[in-house]
Image (cartoon, coloured by chain):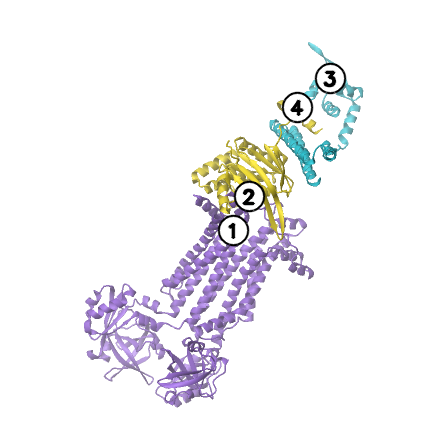
């Protein structure tokens, strides 16, 4: 979340609630709705690290609000984040552990495990599909995010198939 | 209702390939046209009666009576539509070059009559201003070398001679050809007839009846005879006239049958190829249709309907085209369209062939499993052996690729090879027939016509005539001869025996089996005679000539184009003296290169009676027309097969093409690849077909010869030059045909993905 | 819904005879599909999925076992018997669309109705309705080659539905489509399914399979799993998803 907030602040100074709204608009329902408290906690940490500064702005009839803006150090940190390559997904799948280890314990047979997992994946896929259907078609970012998730899920299913073929 | 679905598909498919469909129709139409025209020519050529009868609007029945019959009674007979005459007719004798020939003079009006109208061929018709003129029946005039303007001296029964002149020559459907039909006929005006035969009692009256239905002839004859009571002296009918005009046309008929068969095979092939190729291209669609719920029967039915319709359409178009051609383009030579029998046979035969040819691919289509496979990819064959050889000899890569593609798909490759080879084989056989005919003309001695002329002594003594003939510088030899009819044992019919030359100095018969006769009592025979008697070389046969038995041993077989080969030939000395002396005629062998016509004219000028032999090739001239037409049609069929093949090949290569281009082949190389892929099987087909044709044409023609009685030994293979020219032009045409789609494909931008 | 299942396969076996070697493709499959059900068949390539669905549609013959369609024994039918059954009760969709190349879109869609014996007018009306539903009304006179893959597959679907079949069989219907076209086809499948269409489809695509009520897994020609896709425990409430968390 740190980098997302920094990126938003690099665009323009904003207060915490504005940041929460911006995140929701951009990523849509595909992204877990950020908790406002969490945002303030993160902003506090960023300020402590010297990446952002805040100024109090007075408001009529309401308490002062804190507007955050990015510092030179913050901009530098953001640049580093953007420039460094992002790690690919790590295959240290929990299910795979189950699949390999469970039969040894005699707790479950592999076939049942795999079948159950497949159905679960399909259920997840159905959720994603329904989610995609409910998403505003104009929201490309959100839809792409959902599609990414679907492709990962497809890959998991294909992998499952491979496991089923090759694990005795 | 499900028919609607079938028809919808057939319609859509035809619409999707209009050009190909049109080509199929054209090919079939061409074959049917060629067949019908050839048969019409044959019918007309071998039996001119139909044409003459129709053109001269002849009478079906001629009644010869003593007096003028009751014409109105005859006209009133049921079935009689018109009456010719009655005309007076008188017997007389023609005196020409010292010979006396019986003739019939028949009265005829100066204006050509509507019924039984003689057809003027040369000269003028009779005219009241030139009463001393006659018009002669043409075959009779020919036999005596009479032409318009020739003097014509006639002796009446009273012995008086009248000098008349030949005004013209005419043909008629009322009188057979001379000498089969005697006496010869001369038309004169009534006045001339009165002069020659003034006595009414010595003339008879002829009256012609034209009938509505030729089949009613016998009935009308009966009624006419009954109506006229005792007046009728004799009656002739069109049947007798027709019989006298019929030529021995067995060889011609057999040759035509051969070509007809070839044409049918070619038509079947064209259709099977087109339909087969189409089915092969549509296997996926057919599978889809079956997955939709089309049954096997429905698929077969659809394919048969589609391709069969094209074939039947072609047949109909061909029949119409043939009718038009014979009516307009050949209006001069052919008058009567083909009679119903052969026409029905041709149409029914081609229809059956078409259906049979279509049934096979249709059945194949029906057997397609209903699972539509992935877009058909050509089988990834290994380099064929041929391609490997091509690589070894370092041919350009485009050729190697093409050679590889040419035979990866076995079935289409085989289809292409056959589709080209069979028409090519037929063409070669046609050329063989052509060469055989040429050989007849160039070397008449090989068909028993070493002597171009035959000399009849007439009023001279035989020896005198011979000496006069031999005096001519162009006459090399004169063989004494006699032609006599002989009865053969257990046969009610006679065969021709020909005594020619001496046993010690035989006439050069073309003996192809056994040996020439060398002494008295030996003979050579035509194939027809051997077949008739069931005899073999070495057998003794006994025939009876004029009551005298003659036993000869057959020592050889000669080529015998006359009398369907039913001729026995031996030396004059084998005959009984009464038959042998004096010889009936001399066969004159001319110096090579001498023009028989000129020699004949010279000898005729010396008062000799000389006839010129008719070369069998002249009688078979119609075959040449048939050969040309057939070659054209066969070429068309070959092209159709090639187009199918190249379309199929292209479909297989659409995917490859993109890859080849990606690999860096230039459009020219791509084109070369495609042309090689189609052209190679075509070239193989051409060469195979030519080889097969060349090797079997001789055998086949000999077979024909044997069947027709002429005997084996006449067949000639096409000349090497002719064959080479044909092969080169066929391969050239094939490459050209392959080039057009290849060019288009090579230029086109092709997607890399399927569909 | 009736009690008789639309499809019932009992101990279905298919053995291909290639040369001297018998190759089993399906080894004793038992499958029942009730009316209105949507069943997805999954499995690695070569597991016999296509063979199974081809046998259910009579496109391929079974070596042994029974097939009951709509309460009628079908495996004993002749080839043409199957053809008649297909035109009345089964719609088929293939991976490569398989529109009849020489016919227009309209003709392709009308063909099954005409084959089923419908009068041409009725066939045309049905075609107009279907193409309208699929948003292809303006492409009626186009030839299949002029259509994109997605459009072709939609036409193929319209054709399969032309006779309102009891059973819709599909073999990798999206196997050759990009994701946008896949979505269009899926939406259509979902739509006809909600209208009560019984569907059995073979697929590799999890998105397609997730549409189904039930998933059947094949492995080496045997059914190793057959069961409903469970309701997700984590129902996304009110459209607020947590995709990122799903993947975390």
Q: Residue furthest front?
A: A106
Residue A26 lies in quadrant = top right
Choose between C168 and B230: the one closer to the eye.
Answer: C168
Same chain shared by disc 2 and disc 1: no
Choose between B587 and C40: the one closer to the eye.
Answer: C40
Residue under pointer 3: A67
Disc 1: host chain: B
Same chain shared by disc 2 and disc 3: no
Q: Which mark is residue C98?
A: 2
Label 2, label 1: how far apart the Cα atoms are: 17 Å
Same chain shared by disc 4 and disc 1: no
Choose between B468 and C85: the one closer to the eye.
Answer: C85
- Between circles 4 and 1, the one closer to the viewer is 1
Instruction: Using a 10 Å C-alpha cutoff, classify the residue at mark 3 as few (fewer than 14 neighbours), some (14 to 19) or many (20 or more).
Output: some
Residue under pointer 1: B365
In percent of width and height, residue B561 lies at 44, 76
Colour of chain C in the image: yellow
Point out the tag, 3 or 4, that comes first from the N-terminus.
Answer: 4
Q: Residue at x 30, y 76 (%)?
A: B185
């Amino acid at each position: 979340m740190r980098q997302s907030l920094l990126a938003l602040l690099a665009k323009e100074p904003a207060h915490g609630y504005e940041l929460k709204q911006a995140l929701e608009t951009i990523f849509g329902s595909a992204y877990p709705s950020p908790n406002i408290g969490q945002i303030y906690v993160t902003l506090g940490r960023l300020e402590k690290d010297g990446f952002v500064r805040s100024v109090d702005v007075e408001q009529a009839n309401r308490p002062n609000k804190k507007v955050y803006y990015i510092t030179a150090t913050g901009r530098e940190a953001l640049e580093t984040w953007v420039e460094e390559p992002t790690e690919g997904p790590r295959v240290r799948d929990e299910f795979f552990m189950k699949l390999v280890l469970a039969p040894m314990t005699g707790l479950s047979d592999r076939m049942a495990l795999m079948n159950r997992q497949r159905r679960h994946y399909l259920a997840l896929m159905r959720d994603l599909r329904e989610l995609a259907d409910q998403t505003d078609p104009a929201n490309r970012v959100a839809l792409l995010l959902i599609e990414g998730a679907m492709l990962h899920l497809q890959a998991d299913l294909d992998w499952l198939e491979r496991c089923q073929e090759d694990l005795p | 209702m499900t028919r609607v679905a079938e028809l919808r598909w057939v319609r859509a498919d035809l619409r999707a390939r209009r050009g190909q469909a049109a080509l199929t129709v054209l090919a079939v139409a061409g074959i049917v046209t060629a067949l019908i025209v050839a048969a019409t020519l044959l019918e007309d050529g071998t039996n001119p009666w139909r044409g003459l009868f129709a053109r001269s609007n002849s009478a079906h029945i001629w009644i010869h009576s003593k007096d003028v019959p009751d014409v109105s009674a005859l006209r009133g007979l049921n079935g009689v539509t018109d009456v010719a005459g009655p005309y007076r007719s008188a017997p007389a004798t023609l005196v020409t070059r010292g010979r006396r020939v019986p003739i019939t003079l028949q009265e005829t009006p100066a204006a050509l009559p509507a019924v039984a109208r003689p057809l003027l061929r040369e000269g003028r018709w009779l005219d009241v201003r030139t009463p001393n003129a006659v018009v002669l029946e043409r075959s009779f005039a020919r036999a005596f070398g009479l032409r318009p303007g020739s003097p014509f001296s006639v002796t009446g029964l009273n012995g008086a001679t009248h000098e008349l002149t030949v005004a013209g020559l005419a043909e008629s459907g009322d009188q057979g050809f001379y000498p089969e039909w005697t006496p010869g006929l001369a038309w004169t005006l009534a006045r001339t007839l009165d002069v020659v035969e003034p006595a009414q009692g010595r003339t008879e009256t002829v009256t012609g009846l034209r009938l509505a239905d030729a089949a009613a002839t016998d009935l009308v004859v009966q009624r006419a005879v009954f109506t006229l009571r005792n007046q009728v002296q004799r009656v002739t009918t069109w049947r007798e006239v027709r019989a006298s005009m019929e030529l021995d046309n067995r060889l011609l008929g057999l040759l035509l049958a051969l070509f007809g068969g070839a044409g049918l095979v070619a038509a079947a092939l064209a259709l099977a190829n087109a339909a087969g190729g189409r089915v092969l291209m549509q296997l996926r669609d057919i599978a889809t249709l079956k997955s939709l719920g089309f049954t096997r029967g429905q698929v077969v039915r659809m394919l048969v309907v589609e391709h069969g319709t094209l074939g039947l359409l072609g047949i109909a178009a061909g029949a119409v085209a043939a009718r038009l051609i014979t009516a307009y383009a050949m209006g001069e030579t052919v008058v009567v369209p083909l009679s119903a029998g052969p026409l029905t046979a041709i149409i029914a035969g081609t229809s059956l062939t078409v259906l049979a040819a279509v049934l096979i691919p249709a059945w194949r289509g029906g057997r397609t499993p209903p699972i539509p496979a992935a877009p058909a990819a050509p089988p990834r064959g290994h380099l064929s052996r041929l391609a490997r050889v091509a690589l070894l000899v370092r041919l350009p890569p485009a050729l190697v690729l093409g050679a590889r593609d040419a035979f990866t798909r076995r079935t289409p490759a085989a289809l292409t090879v056959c589709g080209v080879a069979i028409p090519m084989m037929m063409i070669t056989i046609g050329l063989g027939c052509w060469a055989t005919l040429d050989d007849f003309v160039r070397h008449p001695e090989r068909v028993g016509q070493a002597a171009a002329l035959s000399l009849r002594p007439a009023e001279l003594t035989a020896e005198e005539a011979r000496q006069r003939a031999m005096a001519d510088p162009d006459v090399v030899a004169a063989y004494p001869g006699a032609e006599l009819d002989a009865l053969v044992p257990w046969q009610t019919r006679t065969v021709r025996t020909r005594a020619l030359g001496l046993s010690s100095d035989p006439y050069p018969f073309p003996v192809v089996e056994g040996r020439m006769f060398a002494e008295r009592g030996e003979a050579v025979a035509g194939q027809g005679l051997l077949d008739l008697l069931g005899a073999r070389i070495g057998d003794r046969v006994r025939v009876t000539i004029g009551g005298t038995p003659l036993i000869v041993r057959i020592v050889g077989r000669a080529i015998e184009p006359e009398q369907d080969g039913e001729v026995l030939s031996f030396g004059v000395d084998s005959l009984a003296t009464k038959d042998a002396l004096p010889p009936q005629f001399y066969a004159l062998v001319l110096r090579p290169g001498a023009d028989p016509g000129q020699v004949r004219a010279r000898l005729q000028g010396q008062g000799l009676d000389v006839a010129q032999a008719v070369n069998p090739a002249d009688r078979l001239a119609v075959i040449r027309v048939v050969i040309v037409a057939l070659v054209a049609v066969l070429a068309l069929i070959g092209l159709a097969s090639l187009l199918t093949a190249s379309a199929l090949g292209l479909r297989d290569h659409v995917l490859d093409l993109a890859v080849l281009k990606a690999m860096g082949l230039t459009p020219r190389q791509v084109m070369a690849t495609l042309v090689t892929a189609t052209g190679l099987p075509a070239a193989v087909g051409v060469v195979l077909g030519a080889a097969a044709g060349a090797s079997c044409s001789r055998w086949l023609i000999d077979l024909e010869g044997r069947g027709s009685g002429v005997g084996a030994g006449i067949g000639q293979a096409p000349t090497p030059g002719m064959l080479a020219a044909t092969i080169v032009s066929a391969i050239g045409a094939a490459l050209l045909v392959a080039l057009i789609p290849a060019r288009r494909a090579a230029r086109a931008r092709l997607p890399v993905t399927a569909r | 819904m009736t009690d008789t299942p639309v499809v019932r396969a009992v101990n279905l076996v298919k053995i291909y005879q290639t040369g001297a070697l018998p190759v089993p493709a399906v080894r004793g499959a038992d499958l029942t599909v009730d009316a209105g059900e949507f069943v997805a068949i999954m499995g690695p390539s070569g597991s016999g999925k296509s063979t199974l669905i081809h046998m259910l549609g009579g496109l391929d013959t079974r070596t042994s076992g029974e097939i009951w369609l709509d309460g009628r024994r079908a495996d004993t039918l002749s080839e043409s018997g199957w053809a008649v059954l297909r035109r009345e009760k089964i719609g088929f969709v293939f991976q490569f669309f398989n529109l009849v190349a020489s016919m227009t879109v309209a003709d392709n869609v009308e063909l099954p109705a005409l084959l089923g014996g419908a009068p041409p007018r009725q066939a045309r009306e049905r075609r107009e309705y279907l193409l309208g539903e699929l948003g292809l009304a303006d492409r009626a006179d186009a030839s299949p080659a002029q259509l994109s893959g997605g459009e072709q597959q939609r036409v193929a679907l319209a054709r399969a539905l032309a006779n309102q079949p009891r059973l819709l069989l599909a073999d990798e219907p999206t196997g050759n489509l990009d994701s946008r076209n896949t979505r269009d086809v899926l939406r259509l499948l979902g739509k006809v399914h909600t209208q009560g269409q019984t569907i059995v489809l073979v697929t590799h695509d999890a998105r397609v399979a997730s549409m189904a009520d039930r998933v059947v897994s094949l492995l080496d020609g045997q059914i190793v799993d057959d069961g409903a896709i469970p309701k997700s425990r984590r129902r996304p409430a009110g459209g607020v998803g947590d995709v990122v968390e799903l993947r975390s």
